[in-house]
Image: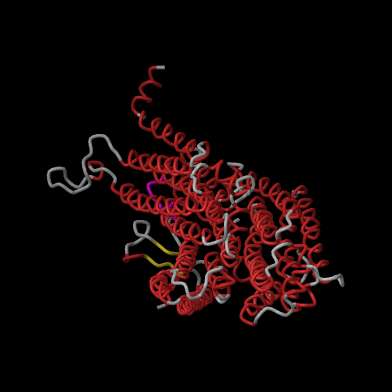
Amino acid sequence: MIHNVPVLIPISLIFFAFFTGILGVMRLRYSQLVAVLASALAFSLAVWGTFHVLNNGELSYSFGNWPQPVGIEFVLDSLSAFMLLVITGTGLILLLFPTKPGFKIEEKRGVPLYAIVLLLMGGLCGIALAGDLFNLYVFLEITSLSTYALVSIGSGKAGMSSFRYLIMASIGGSFYLLGVGFIYFSTGTLNMADVMNLLPELYSSPAVIGGAVFIVTGVCLKMALFPLHTWLPDAHSYAPPVVAAFLAAVQIEASAYIIIRMLLNVFTPEFMARLLPLTDIIGWAAAAGIIIGSVMAIAQTDFKRMLAYSTVGQIAYVGLGIGLANPLGITGALLHIMAHALMKSCLFLIAGGVAHKTGITDINDYRGLGRRMPWTMAAFTVSALAMIGIPPTAGFFSKWYLLLGSLDAGNWAFLAVILASTLLNAVYFFRLIEKVFAPAEPSDASARHPGELSPRLLAPVLVFAVLVLVVGFISVLIVNNLLSPVVQGL
Amino acid sequence: MVIIVAELSFHYSYIMIVVLLVIGLYGMLGKRNLVKKVIGLNIFQTAIFLFFIKGALKDGATVPVIDPETGIEAAAYFNPLPHVMILTAIVVSVAITGVAMALLLNIYRSYDSLEEDVIMQRMGK
């Protein structure tokens, strides 16, 4: 049974997507229930698989019992286990958010909405598990296709931003496929472990170098790494809140995961960091992205749009860790993937809940909400402090490892960028915290709708806020058990 | 010079693939009409499919169905794996085109146009 776990996780999600699709056409409420059960199943399988990996080492599943490297393979190692926990855990809590405020769709309408969400999660789990380059492409495109549909649910300009996103992300996916072609015709294999064994003799070959450049460029486009981030702010701010949370929390993080996987398990760090300056380019682009994303976030007045620009900055932290390409940097990048998934989901759900309850979307109207919605705003404060990076929240520890990594690499510029961006984050979040809790006259919009969010809206928000703190406290455990085997090879 | 010409005449299909890639990229990024962008995307992806198919070809080989007369020598058959991969990639590409068309339909219903400039203008209002 345990040997089937790698394949059962994405299969259970995709299998239930079929039923939720049919149920969704009849009653959306029942299909949400099935979707929650399916993701709970996937999450428990992921936890089981993680404990097995911790105790007994990595698991591998060969489709149709074809031996490697001929057959298709799913691999569950510490890195994929970590990503699976983030994807299925975040997805499970996000799915608990009610349909109407979460997706801006009436619950009585018949749409196969949750089927698309489950397909998105199944695709992401497939990315985390895929053991060969071409299957990774297929799962990447499954993920992207479901996000185009989900983004277009949003209001007004969502259709157009979804179309722009489709064009940019398809260029990214096509570049990745082209790169896979170069690697395949150089090595004759698609299996990641096999490619890694065969590549060292071919490092000087122009085809392999071209393939690596195409793959990294394509994935950076999907990851929205500066300066390829232009599609992100529109797509994320016009999408419905839960979709925006899915995109920011797990979807672009999965692309970051692909780059880390390429760095560690397909090309060696030797090749990507020292023979080619690929990680350096990623690192410097990320350093610019951190500053620009934070500055642009300060300039926004719409809460969701501010969060979208802050995603540009936050994903760049992950890029910075990849750019450092040392054990501490990669640890920081991975820990930041988890921290960002939790805190950004929390903030997007708060944006959705508050907009649903009071109609407030503008930052200035948040004035005086602190006394009216004490629990919501407490959760908001916890995740805002985590975004700035104040201990003991999860955001602090990931930045701490990134700082240590920069010190280790002797890269003072990156150190300065991390410190400066912490100040910039503080500017735009303290501005909001002050508005929320200052004893000023509440804005008209917040005065009209007194009272806390309803329990169903509040529960997922509070769970995320508690998890932001819990992950902060247990970050040492996560690093020592799950992440230290990942970065051993560096 | 002669060597370069010989190389080119042998690899001319790769040059055509690059030309197609550039045409596709121009269509996606340079054209202002949304349908032309989708057409550009299709040209771009088709170029990549051709690249894989070209890579599977071998001189003097035949279709990958084992024939008793040809024997079981691998060099005597085309490589079937890229073809299978591209079949999957074509499915992905068709799905992307379908979703893009659905989005265009929605955009056309909202803004009554598929010209990006006009849509931007009407969005601003």
Would you say residue B24 sits in the magenta stretch? Answer: no
How far across and how far down the image is residue A72, in percent? Answer: 37, 60
- Is residue A324 shown to the viewer in this render? yes
Q: How is the image coloured?
A: secondary structure
Q: Quadrant of residue A14?
A: bottom left
How far across and how far down the image is residue B105, in percent? Answer: 44, 52
Foreground residue among A363 and A418: A363
Residue A183 appears left or right of B54 = right
Position of A35 relative to A287 (above/below)? below
Stretch in magenta: A187-196
Position of A360 relative to A192 (above/below)? below
How far across and how far down the image is residue A177, in percent? Answer: 44, 47
Residue B31 appears left or right of A68 = right
Q: Residue at x 29, y 39 (%)?
A: B57
**Quadrant containing the N terminus of chain B in the rendered view:** top left
How far across and how far down the image is residue B72, in percent? Answer: 20, 47
Residue A5 appears left or right of A463 = left
Q: Give the farthest residue toward the left.
A: B69
Q: Quadrant of residue A13?
A: bottom left
